[in-house]
Image: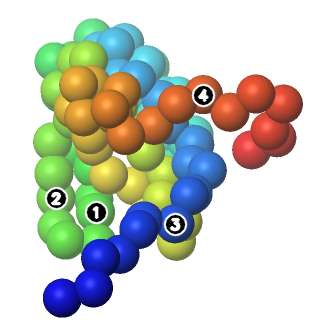
């Protein structure tokens, strides 16, 4: 079976702190009427169904403008900051 390489993709992402629900909503284009009160998790509507982002997880806006959560350790292994790239 031939090997395949994942195409390089630049994404927008925000690490969930428990107090930045408004920032997560802005990233994903949600209408959010709350005030960003502290929460241990946020539910992200993904293409595969609802998934939960916990404090410390990253919320990523994908190539099709979809949102999905990613654990911090996996995010750091998979992504790196882009210098000079405008998102």
Q: Nearer the viewer, residue 44 or 75?
A: 75
Task: Give yes or no for contact between labels 1 and 2 (Cβ–Cβ under 8 Å).
Answer: yes
In the displayed structure, would residue 83 be above or below residue 43? Answer: above
Q: Which residue is mark 2?
A: 50
Check if mark 3's residue and mark 1's residue have beta carbons within 8 Å: no
Circle 3: element type: loop
For label 2, count other residues whose C-alpha is less than 10 Å away and answer few (under 14), some (14-19) or many (20+): few
| Label 1: how many Cα within 10 Å (few below 14, some 14–19, many 20+) | some
* Distance from the alpha carbon under mark 3 to that under mark 2: 26 Å
Q: Secondary structure at mark 1?
A: strand
Classify 35 as above or below 58: above
First of labels 1, 4 by sequence position: 1
| Proximity of marks 2 and 4: CB atoms separated by less than 8 Å | no
User: Residue at 15% of width from left, 42% of height from top?
Assistant: 52
Between 75 and 53, which is closer to the camera in this rendering?
A: 75
**Quick check: 59 left or right of 56?**
right
Pick whichever of labels 2 and 4 is earlier in the sequence: 2
Q: Which residue is mark 1?
A: 46
**Compared with residue 84, is residue 12 higher up or lower down, i.e. above or below?**
below
| Residue located beneath label 3 in the image | 7
Q: Which residue is mark 4?
A: 81
Q: CA distance from mark 1 to mark 4?
A: 23 Å
Mark 3–mark 1 Cα distance, whole angstroms, equals 21 Å
Rendered image quadrant of residue 15: top left
Q: Quadrant of residue 6?
A: bottom left
Q: Are marks 1 and 4 in contact (CB under 8 Å)?
A: no
Q: Nearer the viewer, mark 3 or mark 1?
A: 3
């Amino acid at each position: 079976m031939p090997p395949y390489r994942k195409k390089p993709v630049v994404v927008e992402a925000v690490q969930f702190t428990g107090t930045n629900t408004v920032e997560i909503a802005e990233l994903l284009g949600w209408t959010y009427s709350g005030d960003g009160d502290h929460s241990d998790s946020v539910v992200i509507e993904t293409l595969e169904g609802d998934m939960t982002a916990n404090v410390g997880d990253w919320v990523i806006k994908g190539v099709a403008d979809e949102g999905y959560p990613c654990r911090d350790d996996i995010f750091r292994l998979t992504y790196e900051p882009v210098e000079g790239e405008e998102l």
